[in-house]
Amino acid sequence: MTTETTPPDQIETERLVLRKFRADDFDAVHAYATDEGTYRFMTWGPNTPEQTREVLDRWLKEQEAWPRGDLNYAVTIKATGELIGCCSLHHADTETGAVGYCYHSAHWRKGYGTEAARAVVGLAFGLLGHHRVWATCDARNHGSYGVMEKLGMRREALMRQDVKRRDGWKDSYLYAVLADEWPTS
Ligand SMILES: CC(C)(COP(=O)(O)OP(=O)(O)OC[C@H]1O[C@@H](n2cnc3c(N)ncnc32)[C@H](O)[C@@H]1OP(=O)(O)O)[C@@H](O)C(=O)NCCC(=O)NCCS
C-alpha cells in the first residue's frame, strides 16, 4: 500500500455507502454477529454483547490510524442508511491483501456482497497500488466463493482441512486476482 495515500473514509457505489464504523453502530453489528446464517462459516460467533463491544471498540480505534493492517468498512444501504454488514481488506504486506465480508442474512442474494467487495478490491488495486488480492472461504460456502467468482477471481487452491471450524477441520478454497487482471473501467 502506498502509505502516503490515505484510504477514503467513505466509498459510494450504486446502491451502497461503505463508511467508517461509529459507536452507535453497536445494535446493527450485534444483529449480524448473532445471526446464525452470518456466522455459520465463520470462526467466530454468535457474539456475546461484550464481544461485539470489544470488536467495535477495536475497529473504532484502529480506523483512526494509517497505515494500518485492516480496513474495515461498515456497509450501509444508500437509500435507508441501514448497516447490513462489513467488508474488509486485510493487508498481508504493503502490496498484497485479502478481501473479506459478512452480511446479515436478511440482505443476501441482492448483489450487495459483490457490489461492496468490488469497491474494496478496486480501492486495493487503485489508490493503494496493490499487486494481488486474495480471499479464502470454507469450501461449503457457495455464497462466498460466488462473490469471488463474480468479481473475476480465480480459484487457485483447495486447501485440505486448513481451518478448524465449529464442526471440525474443514477444507477451504483460495481465490485470487492480480492487478493487471482487474478491469479498470
Ligand atoms: C457470502 C455472502 C457475503 C454473499 O453475499 P451476497 O450479498 O448474498 O452475495 P451476492 O448477492 O453478491 O451473490 C453473488 C453470487 O454468489 C452466489 N451466491 C450467493 N449466495 C449464495 C447462496 N446462498 N447459495 C449459492 N450461491 C450463492 C450466486 O452466484 C450469486 O450471484 P447471483 O445471485 O447473481 O446468482 C453472504 O452470504 C454472507 O454474508 N454470508 C455470511 C458471512 C460469510 O460467510 N462471509 C464469507 C466468509 S469467507
Image: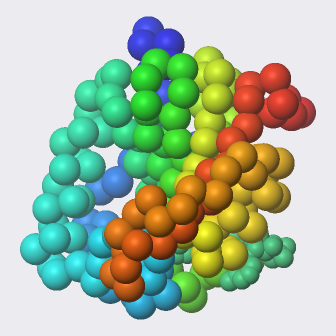
Q: Position of residue 58 (x, y in %)?
A: 19, 50
The residue under the point 62% across, 36% down is 133
**Residue 178 seen by the camera:** yes
Q: Is residue 87 left or right of residue 174?
A: left
Residue 37 higher or lower than 155, as above or below: below
**Residue 8 seen by the camera:** no
Q: How many marks?
A: 0
Residue 63 higher or lower than 79, as above or below: above
Q: Where is residue 159 in the image (x, y as percent from the top left)?
A: 56, 56
Q: Residue 158: which quarter of the image?
A: bottom right
| Image quadrant where one finds the C terminus | top right
Q: Position of residue 20 (x, y in %)?
A: 39, 48
Q: Residue furthest left?
A: 50
Q: Which of 169 and 110 is in front in this view?
A: 169
Q: Residue furthest top?
A: 4
The residue under the point 81% across, 58% down is 150
Q: Residue 33: which quarter of the image?
A: bottom left
The residue under the point 67% across, 74% down is 143
Q: Is residue 149 left or right of residue 32?
A: right
Image quadrant of ligand 1 equals bottom right
Q: Nearer the viewer, residue 85 or 97?
A: 97
The residue under the point 50% across, 13% down is 2
Residue 164 higher or lower than 114, as above or below: below
Residue 59 higher or lower than 162, as above or below: above
Q: Residue 177: which quarter of the image?
A: top right
Which color scheme did the rendering employ for the protein?
rainbow
Q: Where is residue 176 in the image (x, y as percent from the top left)?
A: 69, 42
